[in-house]
Image (cartoon, coloured by chain):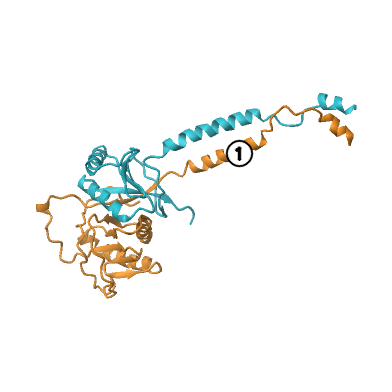
Amino acid sequence: MGMDVGTKKGPRSDINITPLVDVVLVLLIIFMVLTPLMEKEMGVRVPEDTPPEMQNEPPPPDLTQIVFKVDENSNFHINNETVTDANVQERLKAYYRLAKSKEATQGPPVIFFDADDKTKYVSAVKALDAIRDSASGWTIGMMTESIKSPAPDTTSAPDGGGVGPAAPAPAPTTEPAREAPK
Amino acid sequence: MGMDVGTRSGVRSDINITPLVDVVLVLLIIFMVITPMLQRGKSVELPKAKHAVSKEGPEPAFVSVTKDGLVYLEQDKTPASDQQLIEAMKQAGAEGKRVMIKADTETEYGKVRPVMNLASKAKLKGVSLAAEEIKGK
């Protein structure tokens, strides 16, 4: 036992760098993991800026516009219908089929999106994600002027054919989207 | 006491980690320097989305909307005016760049919509919303 004491005699002159190495390695790993988490994006369209005198062309009579609205409590509305997290996918798919069936006359399926001023941005992105989730073919048009929140009304549904033109929305354009959905 | 001889003349069993430390430290410093450079625009907490994708093409122009609703161009120190934003977006459009809107998760949507309105005024057809991708599934 005494021998051990003898061999360690005198103060050790080298710094114990093991904790330093530990810390530095962990930092290195953190940075290596964070660096590839680059920003991803979602493409949306904004209405084209047309001179006021050209704005009042009447839309085609059978035009069905689909307006997706998020209210300040983060509830989703499609046209006049209030949807829940549970049925939003199903409803969006139904609207997509409807829009797709009219593609020949009305151009690619367009859904207009708006959220209440007080909605948290994260809810808006969640809604956009849900739209992308339902069908990849949607062209999402952002409405740049706020509309009044539609009164809850569950009568209009795409399968019933009762989707009337809803709130005023910017007219869809038929040009290929520059920010085409993937 | 014969033990003392043994401690000096035997093979050293511990690895010399000094070069390892050197290399790791240099890597660490490189990453620390590069990481802030990779980030464009203001630092905001981005919302998460399943359908966020990376897009090819030239580096987009960044417009950031912070939690308190202030709008910044790229990494400017002061909030940008509407006129500056339109000018910047028009320029980006002319150069064929996208405009990326980076808004904080906590921002009110009413602060983001005017930016899109300006994008429309700048004759852009669309904008990109920055999001973090949800991994898995």
Query: Residue B84: where, in percent of width, then height?
Result: 24, 40
Which residue occupies the extreme left position in the image? A53
B11 to the left or right of A73: right
Which residue, as the protein is rendered here, is positioned at the far right? B1
Identify the amino acid type marked 1.
Val
Mark 1 nearby-residue class (10 Å; few <14, some 14–19, many ≥20) = few
Quadrant in the picture for the N terminus of chain B: top right
Q: Quadrant of residue B25?
A: top right
Residue B39 percent across, percent down from the top left: 41, 40
Residue in view at x 27 percent, y 53 percent: B113
Q: Would residue A176 be visible to someone looking at this image?
A: no
Residue that appears at 31% across and 55% down: B109
The residue singled out by tag 1 in the image is A23
**Which image quadrant for residue A19?**
top right
Rendered colour, chain A: orange
The answer to whether A35 is drawn above or below residue A156 in the figure is: above
Residue shown at 37% from the left, 65% from the top: A89
From the top left corner, tell me how far across and down residue B18 is, in percent: 65, 28
Give the colour in which the image draws chain B: cyan
Q: In the shown orientation, is residue B42 left or right of residue B10?
A: left
Q: Nearer the viewer, residue B114 or A108?
A: B114
Residue A35 x/y as whole percent: 48, 41
Q: Which is nearer the eye, B93 or A15?
A: A15
- x 19%, y 64%: residue: A63
Q: Identify the element where label 1 is drawn.
A: helix
Relative to residue A38, is residue B22 drawn left or right? right
Question: Which image quarter: residue A126?
Answer: bottom left
